[in-house]
Structure formats: structure tokens, C-alpha cells
Image (cartoon, rainbow, N blue to C red):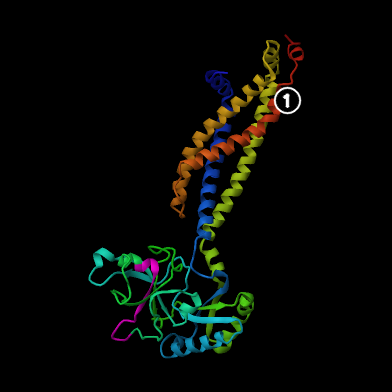
Amino acid sequence: MSFYLLFKVLFSRKVVTTLLLLQLAMTLALLLNSVLLAQQTRQQLNQPTGLDLDNILLVQLKPTSAPLRVYPALADLLNRQLSAVQAIPGVIAAAYSNQSAILQGGNNGNIYVSEQQERTNVSTVPMYFVSKDFFNVLNSQVLQGELPQHSVSLDAPVSPDVVLTQSLADKLFAGTPAEGQQTSRGRVAAVISDFYGQRSGDHIMYNSVQVAPPYGVDWGYSILLRTTPAQTEAVRQQLASVLQKVESNIEIFHIRTLAEQHQRLYRNEYGLAMLLTILSALMLLVTMVSSYSSTHFQALKRQQEIGIKRALGASKSVILLELLSENWLCTALGAILGVALALWLNQALAQVISIPALNWYLPLVTMMVLLLCVTLATWYPAAIATRISPASATKAL
């Protein structure tokens, strides 16, 4: 059957064909972007973090009493809290920090090699002010130098030494040894293995750490604990009561594992991917039902025409191919419109969330899936139409 005749048949029923084309286009657009978003979310959730997510607990809290938020009372509070949580059975190491790992954003700023700002400046790098056991909590591997062992006051004449993650050291010093080099944040004491810092930073693995007390805790601070795998949940259950016994004038915002923190960081993408997937599945189901109904209706309407063709020698396979070709052409036209609609939807979603641009192969794969679903939906009514007897179809002639 020629394309001209196929087009003629399709557009002889303008309303039905137009509705089917719109439905197919919307289905493809939703399906494409839901697959794209699901792929990205899966990659993000499975990307290396450099952390033992399941066995590191994060406590986010702040003092409710104003005197406890400033030194020296704050230093005493931090020391008492660390001593208490380290005494909990199952805790391997504990440390305070001005902020947690695995955040959307937080305390950050630029960093560069001294006297080489224009060439080496990195604009958004998290700044961690921590106690010395912070590296034990993260189970960091020391790649260069030695870790600072004593907390240095931020009011000291000389800035505390800085510890860089490997990715940041490579960026700043282009593969040359970083130990002893001077940066805008202080002298590099050590380079450690990468860990996930802030999603909104220049790079999730760019981090600088200083063993020093936090500037202030008006917005709260973090206590991080590494536990033995079998006792993570048991330690979690005790943390709130232990910290309240140390000091009742505190507010505990949350206690969660870094695995839960990681999941929450991508919950918007995950939720939207699930919503689009469900909508795509429903749209695909409705499209299949519509294609089935349309083909069944057309087969009944064209019984006489099909019977005459059978009487003139057309085989069942020819009739079947003809009916399927009409649906394949309609699906192809709808898919072309769907790709254009998918591009628009992709750009609209990019204004709200992080979503990659459409690649060249995903539309082809999605079009094949849509074509397969439409074929499955229309096969049965098309096959029934081939069974029309030429004699019964021509009785009215």
C-alpha cells in the first residue's frame, strides 16, 4: 500500500487521527523525560561518595541558650558532647563540624594558590571547621602530608593549616605535591581521599578542612559519628537522650545516616521521576486502549471494503499489514510531534530542576517502545478483521 493512500485513509477521519496524534505525542514526551530523569537520578544515587554512608550518623543541632553559642561556653559544650557520644557502645569515632558532608549548599567560598589567583581560583568550595577526629569519622585516607592534631583558634595570628581533598589539590596544583603550599585559606598540611561535600559547589569532591572551632553556631552545627555496622541503629536510638543529658538547652533538628542524607538530597528528582513514570505508564495504557478501539471501530466500519478485497484475491496477511501500516504511520507522525514536545518539556523542567538535555539515541529507543506497544494493542482487532468472509461482506451489494 502506498504512503499516499495511507495518508488519505488516516486523514479521512480527521478528528480521530488528530486526537490520536496528540495522545501519542504527549505520551512520547512524558516517556522520554521520565526515562531521562530516572537515568540521571539513578546515576546520582549510585555515584561514589567516598563515605561509608550506612555507618556514619549525622546529628544536626544547636544550643537554644544564647550564652552556649559563644566561646568559651561553646567550646566546653562541644567537648562534653563529644566525650558523651564517644562513650556510647558501638561508636568508633566522633567529631563536630560546622556543617555536614553531602549537602545541597552551605558554608563555602573561593580558594586559590597564593599569588596565583587568576590562574587557580576555584569559586565555590565548602569550608569545614572540625575537631581532629573528623578524618577518623570519614575514614579518610591520607595521601600527602600529616593531619593536624590540635585545634587552632580562628583568631590566631596565623590561619590554621588546611587539609584538601585529592580532586581539589589536583585542580589547584596541577598534579604537583600540595603539601606545604600556601593557599588563600592557609598552608596545606595534608591531602586526603575525596568525599562528597556540596552538590552546589564547583565539584562535589572539592573540599577544604581546617581543624578549628566553628565561627559561630547560630544556625547550628553537626556531630558526625562512625559506628560499627551491627550497632548503627542502636547508637542512633541512644543519641538524643545522651545529648540531652549532657545539656538540656539544645534543639536536635534530626538524626540520620549519611545514606538517608544522600537520598534526601535527590528526593526532588526521585519524586518527579516517579511521578513522570507513573503518568507515562498511564498515558501509554490509555494510548494502547485508544489504538485498540480505533482499529476495532475501523475494522467494523470497513467490513464490506475488506470483504471485497478478499474476494478480489487479497490475502489475510495483506489485509493485516494494511491495517497495521495505518497505525504505524499514525504512530510515526505522533512520535515526530512527541520529540518536539519532549524538547520543550525538557527545557521547561530544566528551569526547575537539574535534568540533562535529550541525547540522540533515547528518542529512537522510546519511539520503538511506543511503536511496539501500539502494535500489540492493534494486532488483535486487525487479525479479527482478516477473518471477514468475502461472501458475508458482499451480501448487501
Q: Residue at x 63, y 23 (%)?
A: 321
- Type of residue at label 1? Ile
Residue 231 appears in the figure: yes
Q: Is residue 215 above or below residue 329?
A: below
Residue 158 located within the stretch drawn in magenta: yes
Residue 297 lies in quadrant: top right
Crowd around label 1: few <14 · some 14–19 · many ≥20 (10 Å): few
Instruction: Give the percent coordinates (x, y) of residue 238.
Output: 62, 82
Q: Going by the picture, which residue comes out furthest to the left?
A: 115
Residue 266 located within the stretch drawn in magenta: no
Indicate left or right for 178 with 71 as reference: left
**Looking at the image, which is closer to me, 368 or 218?**
368
Instruction: Give the percent coordinates (x, y) of residue 94.
Output: 51, 81
Residue identifier under label 1:
384
Q: Residue at x 39, y 82 (%)?
A: 148
Looking at the rendered structure, the secondary structure element under dot 1 is: helix
Indicate left or right for 33 with 178 as reference: right
User: Which range of residues does the magenta coloring cover?
Assistant: 155-169
**Looking at the image, which is closer to me, 21 or 194?**
194
Q: Is residue 363 above or below residue 63?
A: above
Question: How many marks on residues?
Answer: 1
Q: Is residue 218 above or below residue 26?
A: below
Q: Is residue 319 above or below residue 226?
A: above
Q: Residue at x 53, y 80 (%)?
A: 251
Q: Residue at x 55, y 89 (%)?
A: 246
Q: Can you say which quadrant of the picture contains the N terminus?
A: top right
Instruction: Give the percent coordinates (x, y) of residue 95.
Output: 49, 81
